[in-house]
Amino acid sequence: MIRTFRYSRVDVDTSANIPSRINVETAAQRLGKAISYQTVSTQSSKDFNESEFLNMHQYLENAFPLIHASLKKEIINDYSLLYFWEGKDPELKPVMLTCHLDVVPIEPGTENEWKYPPFEGKVSEGYIWGRGAMDVQGGVLAIMEAVEYLLSKEFRPDRTIILGFGHDEEIDGERGAQAIGETLAQRGIELACLLDEGTPIVHDVLAELPNPVALVAVAEKGYLSLELSTSAEGGHSSVPQGLTAIARLSEAIQKLEKNPMNNKVDGLVKQTMTAIGPQMPFLYRIVMANLWLFGGLVKKELAAMPATRAALGTTIATTIFESGIKENVLPTQAKAIVNFRIHPNDTIESVIDHVRRTINDPEVRISELPGSINPSQISDVAASPYKTLKKTIREVFPDVIVAPTLMIGATDARHYAHLTDNIYRFLPLRADEGDLDRVHGTNERLSKENYREMIEFYIRLIEESAD
Ligand SMILES: [Zn+2]
């Protein structure tokens, strides 16, 4: 009980309104124009449209003249952009803001479901419409607007500010963010912190929670695919001998999917709960303030929903299964691909070890596919860049509570991991469940009011991080 009472509410102001310093009408038009460039990342490089990226570069140069007069611009691998805004004090480590220039394609057949054409960048009904409005031309342009505004006020940071915009985040970020990260490392640059796009401000997440939550991802999951395979005697299906290759491999996969790695309400999930708990009704606060006692209950609740279950532990999903060539021929081979998203509690090694022990069948071979990556480090919420970030969010969005979280997808941020311990993934975008479906989906849009808040957020963040 004492814990519950001590665990008091934070002040949230629901009259979210801060004085506007920028003209959102012209900013919205500039974002609309940026959306009109079809900077689409496609799986096959032959569909890459070079001129759209180059035209977008040219457009940014025209739309943001002060940035292009005052910052040092470099082009990395032809299409990614890197800007240096030199600080007054070279002793201070730079702050880096990142987002990406590319967008995902429009799913064929859905073009007509868009209220306005996806690459028109129409400003209408209080929104900026089009592919990239949320993910993440809106982020790129909001950062540019913020810097351009500050330059117009003759602001000069003490600390160097670096802007990095990769061009292939939606594929793997190897030619964009990874190359930018390597360029900075080669010059011996260490960052004070890095803010990439990431989790948004979510509205209506929990029925019990009256406030929106600004989720700041302080870690992201790792990635691993394993190929499982087995062989068996071939021959005619009229004379089967023992288990078929299909049956043997199916059994292994069943065992694996039914025995996930240990989920725990600890570390990050506990940090998230601790941050949002005080805003919950009294009974919930009792539970949240006493996770040492109610952890099992909370875990059960969270494990009931796929999205929150994914935050609790390493997920296992069999995505490909191949075997057999003809209905009356015994297959000599069976092969499956199992995809894992690795929780920061686990590693590539510990997952492979778990798979080997769980399947426990020497006839099933296990091999690691290329592209695996360990989960990120967890950035410290007690570090001063996190505190600055939290303070800035609360100033610009007085109605929200700020909570650290785990990103269950991947971002470009992993390519910068060697430059700083303080990496945060957050986009100041307000989203309810319906809005989240628009990301990578149909009718992607950003409200002008939210866009104004986003620009204001980056202005304040630069002001507050700069010294
Ligand atoms: Zn993105």
Image (tube, rainbow, N blue to C red):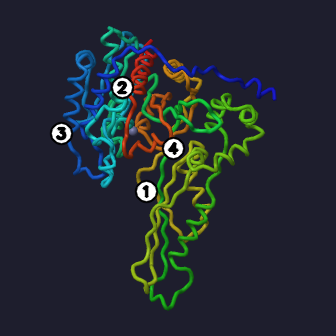
Q: Nearer the viewer, mark 4 or mark 1?
A: 4
Would you say 385 lies left or right of 9 here?
A: left
Instruction: Check disc 3 and report its element: helix, strand or loop.
Output: helix
Separation of marks 1 and 2 at Cα, in angstroms: 38 Å
Q: Is residue 159 visible?
A: yes
Marks 4 and 2: CB-CB under 8 Å?
no
Residue placed furthest toward the bottom: 238
Q: Nearer the viewer, mark 4 or mark 2?
A: 2
Between discs 4 and 3, the one toward the N terminus: 3
The amino acid beneath tag 1 is: Leu
The amino acid beneath tag 2 is: Ala
Q: Nearer the viewer, residue 264 or 5?
A: 5
Residue at 56% over, 42% down? 344
Query: Residue 254 location, x and y as percent?
Result: 59, 66
Instruction: Check disc 4 and report its element: helix, strand or loop.
Output: loop
Separation of marks 4 and 1 at Cα, in angstroms: 20 Å
Q: Nearer the viewer, residue 353 or 47?
A: 47
Quadrant assignment, res 255 = bottom right
Q: Nearer the viewer, mark 3 or mark 2?
A: 2
Q: Quadrant of the N terminus?
A: top right
The amino acid beneath tag 3 is: Ser
> Which residue bears the numbered disc 4?
408
Between discs 3 and 2, the one toward the N terminus: 3
Crowd rating for badge 1 (residues with CA inside 10 Å; few <14, some 14–19, many 20+): few
Instruction: Check disc 1 and report its element: helix, strand or loop.
Output: loop
Q: Is residue 42 above or below residue 426?
A: below
Would you say 89 lies left or right of 175 here?
A: right
Q: Which mark is residue 51?
A: 3
Q: Nearer the viewer, residue 465 or 352?
A: 465
Residue at 50% over, 38% down? 432
> Which residue bears the numbered disc 1?
369
